[in-house]
């Protein structure tokens, strides 16, 4: 069975500071994909970043980077230079080798303080 | 075009009404999804269509009826809903699985209120 755990229900960060959102996962699949999504109060789920289980390097997309530690089964999202517009819910998700199902964590609510 | 569209944006309906939610994508994706989401909670998977065939039904009550008329369209027919069905309904699409880890693209959602 696949499981995603996000242990931080809410986080606060000062504007322009960096913040790390935690995500751990559990799977018996040897091959899988890990994703982070942002959901502002408007409701739309926005894809941020992807990490494949066999990728040798940590993924980066602009101010977003993924700290992937395969042995620890963790895939933490790092947001650098936080902006007020980063205030949102953030969901970590995983997709296994077969099938079409995505498994979501419970989410972290991030608030950026001016 | 990396867009998934959903209509309507908002819907208010009584418990005896019949309504439909619509979703469309033109990215050539062959997997399409319906999710239900309550505030501050993760999306809950309802249905998955793969190559226009229903592949996953997460024990959803029969008052929700999905339909995939073609590879670009996905509908969710609603009938005799309950107030607890009020939620944000998200449609998503992706390439099918089998070693393919492309992300899901989500639509903006339909905010449904059942009175």
Image (cartoon, helix red, strand yellow):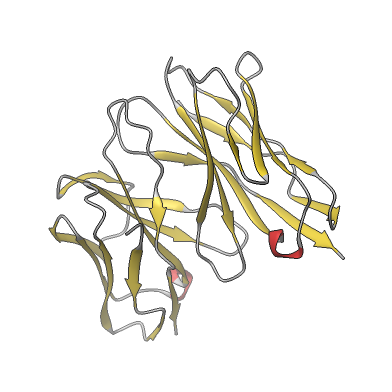
Name the quarter where the C terminus of chain A is drawn.
bottom right
- The answer to whether residue B114 of the structure is visible from this angle is yes
Residue A38, percent from left and from top: 59, 54
Give B96 or B46, whichever is nearer the viewer. B96
| Left or right: A63 as drawn, with respect to B92 | right
Name the quarter where the N terminus of chain A is drawn.
top left
| Circle count | 0
Quadrant in the rendering for residue A19: top right
Q: Which residue is found at the position 56% from the left and 71% from the top?
A: A42
| Left or right: A10 as drawn, with respect to B32 | right
Q: Residue at the far left: name it.
A: B69
Give A1 or B95, whichever is nearer the viewer. B95
Q: Is residue A40 above or below residue A80?
A: below
- The answer to whether residue B63 of the structure is visible from this angle is no
Q: Which residue is found at the position 63% from the left and 13% from the top?
A: A71
Residue B109, percent from left and from top: 43, 68
Q: Residue at the far front: name it.
A: A62
Give B101 or B53, whichever is nearer the viewer. B101
Q: Is residue A100 above or below residue B49?
A: above
| Left or right: A79 as drawn, with respect to A54 | right
Quadrant in the rendering for residue A57: top right
Q: Is residue A43 above or below residue A25?
A: below
| Left or right: B86 as drawn, with respect to A7 | left
Q: Which residue is found at the position 45% from the left and 52% from the top?
A: B44
Residue B62, percent from left and from top: 25, 61
Residue B20, percent from left and from top: 26, 75
């Amino acid at each position: 069975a696949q499981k995603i755990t996000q242990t931080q229900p809410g986080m606060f960060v000062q504007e322009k500071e960096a913040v790390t959102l935690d995500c751990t996962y559990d799977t018996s699949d040897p091959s899988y994909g890990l994703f982070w999504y942002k959901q502002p109060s408007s409701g739309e789920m926005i894809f941020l970043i992807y990490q494949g289980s066999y990728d040798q390097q940590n993924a980066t997309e602009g101010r977003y980077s993924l700290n992937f530690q395969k042995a620890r089964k963790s895939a933490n999202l790092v947001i650098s230079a936080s902006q007020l517009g980063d205030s949102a819910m953030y969901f970590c998700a995983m997709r296994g080798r077969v099938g079409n199902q995505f498994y979501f964590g419970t989410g972290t609510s991030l608030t950026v303080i001016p | 075009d990396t867009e998934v569209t959903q209509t309507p944006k908002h819907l208010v309906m009584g418990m005896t009404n019949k309504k439909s939610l619509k979703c469309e994508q033109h990215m050539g994706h062959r997997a399409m999804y319906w999710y239900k989401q309550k505030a501050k909670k993760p999306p809950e998977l309802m249905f998955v269509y793969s190559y226009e065939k229903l592949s996953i039904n997460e024990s959803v009550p029969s008052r929700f009826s999905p339909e995939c008329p073609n590879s670009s369209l996905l509908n969710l027919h609603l009938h005799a809903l309950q107030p607890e069905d009020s939620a944000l309904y998200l449609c998503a699409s992706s390439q099918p699985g089998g070693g393919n880890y492309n992300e899901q693209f989500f639509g903006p959602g339909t905010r449904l209120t059942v009175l």
